[in-house]
């Protein structure tokens, strides 16, 4: 079975993902004051970065810091939702 990260859109609620929680070091840190699992709204995109709004404040994070959930391939070319972004 293959899986892929679910696509996300402007206005969609997603969770922030801190890669250091998986032993990946701190190559893509979350900005100070933002935490792993925090729900935010996508408000913009720019070449590998995502602009988000959460709790009345805005920031820019690396695209790898977005957890939008996963889809699984159940037949050639056919995908379905695997989880809810948690």
Image: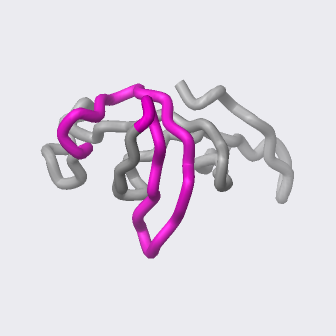
* Residue at far left of view: 25
Horizontally, residue 19 falls left or right of residue 17, namely left
The residue closer to the viewer here, 51 or 14, is: 51
**Quarter location, residue 41:** top right
Horizontally, residue 69 falls left or right of residue 45, namely right
Magenta residue span = 30-56
Horizontally, residue 43 falls left or right of residue 2, namely left
Quarter of the picture containing the N terminus is top right
Q: How is the image coloured?
A: one colour
Q: Is 78 located above or below residue 71 in the figure?
A: below
Relative image position of residue 83 (x, y in whole percent): 65, 28
* Residue at far front of view: 56
**Quarter location, residue 54:** top left
The residue closer to the viewer here, 14 or 67, is: 14
Residue 12 within the magenta-colored segment of the rendering: no
Residue 33 within the magenta-colored segment of the rendering: yes
Relative image position of residue 62 (x, y in whole percent): 35, 57
Q: Is 37 located above or below residue 5 in the figure?
A: above
Which residue does the image show at 85% across and 48% down from the upper left? Answer: 75
Which residue does the image show at 85% across and 51% down from the upper left? Answer: 78
Task: State the count of labels.
Answer: 0
Relative image position of residue 43 (x, y in whole percent): 56, 54
Q: Is 61 located above or below residue 31 in the figure?
A: below
Horizontally, residue 19 falls left or right of residue 65, namely left
**Quarter location, residue 20:** top left
Which residue does the image show at 69% across and 42% down from the upper left? Answer: 71
Relative image position of residue 39 (x, y in whole percent): 49, 29
Which residue does the image show at 55% across and 37% down from the upper left? Answer: 14
């Amino acid at each position: 079975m293959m899986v892929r990260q679910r696509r996300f859109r402007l206005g969609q609620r997603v969770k922030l993902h801190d890669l250091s929680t998986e032993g990946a070091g701190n190559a893509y840190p979350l900005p100070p004051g933002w935490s792993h699992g925090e729900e935010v709204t996508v408000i913009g995109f720019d070449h590998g970065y995502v602009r988000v709004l959460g709790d009345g404040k805005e920031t820019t994070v690396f695209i790898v810091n977005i957890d939008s959930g996963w889809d699984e391939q159940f037949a050639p070319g056919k995908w379905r939702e695997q989880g809810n972004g948690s």
